[in-house]
Amino acid sequence: MNIHLRAISAIVKKDVLELLPLVIITIVAFLLQSIIAVTNYEGDADFWATLQANFYWIGYFLGTLLMVSVLQQDPAASLNHDWLTRPIARRDWLLAKLLFLMLTICIPVVLSRFLINLSSGYDFGLSMSYALGIEKLPGVLPIPLFFAIALLTPSLRKAIFLVMLVLFVFLIPAWSATRPLLEKIGINLGSAEFTGMGWVQSMPMLAAGISGSLLIYWFFYCRRDVRRAYFVFCASIAIFFFTVFPPSSLYNWNKAIALHEFMYNGKDESLEDALVLKFTQACFPAAIGGNNANSGQNDLVLAQAFWFDKLRNMSDAGGLTFATTVRARNSLVSWHQSITRNSELPIDWRIDHLYSKARYSADSLNEDVILRRSPTAVNRYAPMDSTQTDYWLIPPELVNVLANDSSTRLTIEYDMAILSPKPYELKTDGNRYDFPELGSCKAEIDENANSIEVECVKAGTRPELMSAQLIGLDDSRVDSANWSNFTADWLEVFGRTQSKLTLESPDLVDSTSVMLIAYNVERIVHKEITSEGMLGESLDICSLPGDEQFAAIERSNWSDKSPHEVSSVAVDRGVRVEVLDWRNGETKDAPNIFLLPGLGATVHSFDEVAPKLAEKYNVVGMTRRGAGASSTPDHGYDIARLSQDVLEVLDTLEIESPILVGMSIAGEELSYLGANFPDRFSGLVYLDAAYDRTLPANKKYRDLNLLLPGSLPMRPQEGTSYQAMQQYAERRGRPRNIPEGEIIASYDLTSGQIKHNSLYLDAVMMGLQAPDYKNIAVPALGVYALAGSPEFMMESWYDENDPVIQQAVQELYQIERGKVAAIELFDTEIPDSEVLILEDGYHWVFLSHEQEVLTAIDEFIKQLTDQTLQ
């Protein structure tokens, strides 16, 4: 087999000369992209960035046109009539065409990318490595198809006609008339979005395209068998079509997941036990279509769910749409020694929700009812969330059947991927740093946009997911994709990836570095969760839309009855905090008390105890920034700034020498103010608040808590009023609820979940300092809640006979008793201190032991008054 270089070079030369204008335009388009990237233009930066991005598609179009044109220079019918080089071997002709494409497309593309990479600050080796990779793997799939079309057609006009014919075939599923026919062969449009697993579909397409092109070349150019060449082309198009729109019998979620289970799952099944599913709501939000019900919840559920064609008709005819929210409780965590924070930080493993399906079973049914799932799940494009909300449709003819059968059970199945994290810290100095799994990365603070721009480039294999976040703030996390990428490593070897992520509000914490996390799939798991009753529990608890009880829930009534005045006080530029004032004028000359709430709470926490204090004292309180009705700026959450907010409020209201009373995290402000501004305060009262929260995290405490079941979800009727919610407190084994005003301010009455943005709460935690007890020159009272026995820590919803729970509670009790050391430190280091330990007290100690706390505060203030008089 001799390769005739002279013949090949002659063909290439001929093709270049005949297609010279198109060759020049194509090469210029490729190089213009690099020129735009290298040159710093004034004006709209977004415009130039968009123009540069669009040149990719311009180049793609011109390259495709050039490929078709060069193959049509020597159509099959002319192979024996070329006066310049004929007769020639067919392989020489093919090699000449491929060489032409390499010289006019591949080399200019690589050169253009190389120049762009150099201008972006990459070193020579990285620039070349990144330039040689395939930028968009899906963009490769149509190339063999266009190659085959070029082989079959002698002119550009016929090639365009054949392309339009192919497009016509792929548009057939969009016709309403063809949908029923496609459904008969198992093609249900909109029901199969394989997301990160869709790469499997590309393999038959790529194989069909390459093998089809080779066979067409063989039959058309070597054997002159036109019929077989067109048959191969039609077969390739059919494979393409049924790969893009696969019948359920050919490729479905079960097969996709089974394939990836084979790829990822080993024999170790221990990870399966680390994942526990739980419904977040006692009753599922539900709605009936048509005119059968009208309510806020009904309209909301119907608006969020979406149904195609006949399913929409089913919904409008009285079908029941309901939503299920399930939390995947994950006990897997890795610990990262942060260089920036100089402490260990927990990094949770991630859960990627892949697929869910649901079915009803009941004694009155001959077989289980498989429910249709709306494609508009709440976190459809954020499946990495720990919760998954899906919408389901019950056909109208089955609504009453299921409602009237007490044996009705709902089972939901979930397929999920467990991803392990590998964290790295990246300095925000604009320099590039290399990381094993993420490639070359840089981060730079954009002061004008108040953001941090993160960019990573990687040639070859990459992790299934990458994320960036401010260190310690999980809610600042930004992912590189909406879902995990399961593409096989052997396929990724040929590709290149550029990830650009933007982190907002860098001033929330110390942003000299950010955290990058590479996530890799460790296992694909299958889990089921079952609910007794049609909508979560029995219908006397979870009523159907339109029932009298359902209407009563929607007429719920809540109000803040505490006798306070509400105001908003400016503490910083653009920052105001909520202030509650219980002063009544009758205690004008009495001591002043200033109240500070705990983390994730507002000053309404004191709505019940403050009026009782106001009978003797002048009582005022504030909600710190980041919570409740106070501002939520993107800065100022360090303890020094939070403490300054307190001083600003005191100055504005002209409150002198107050006793500062703080709950929980407010102990941080108390300790800072007591050590740095002792002359501004008469005394400090810590309500289960005096701890050093900068000490290393107790890993065992976290792990043990993950073994315990979460709290009971609130039932709808328990959210109709404050009095009704007392039933919820009793069901949870609590002697009383938190104040009504605090529930309104901090909780979603539908789900019982906290309303405050945890981003700001975490920012507070990242800004803490170790308490400087020795320099607190103010009398201090420390009130501590301490469990008196393991039995006290056994919540009412725990299974007290479960040995795992028994052991976990026993060990948690031992950790709880470790607070004694913190109490002794407080009592010995503060020069003027006293301690009150309340056995079997809850963290909200002024609620569980209200009278004891009030008495302790009275006695403490009396001592302060006596000292002043002396």
Image (cartoon, grey):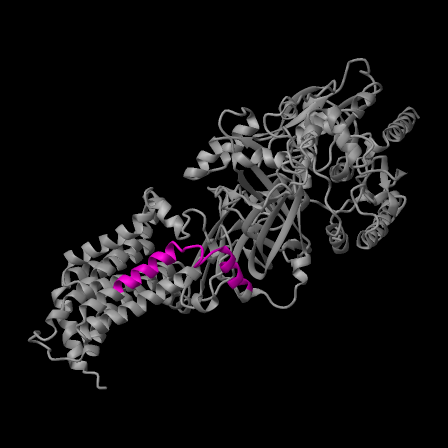
Residue 508 part of the magenta segment: no
Q: Is residue 815 above or below residue 84?
A: above
> Who's the residue at 29% across and 64% down the image?
144
> Where is the N terminus found, in terms of image quarters?
bottom left
Residue 432 is at least partly visible in this image: no
Residue 759 spot, x, y in % from top left = 61, 42
> Who's the residue at 49% across and 50% down the image?
482
Q: Foreground: 617 or 261?
A: 261
Relative side of 776 to 44, left or right: right
Relative side of 22 to 373, left or right: left
Q: Residue furthest top?
A: 586
Q: Is residue 1 above or below residue 379?
A: below
Q: Which residues are magenta?
A: 233-261
Q: Foreground: 197 or 491?
A: 197
Q: Main secondary structure of the magenta part?
A: helix
Q: Quadrant of residue 420?
A: bottom right
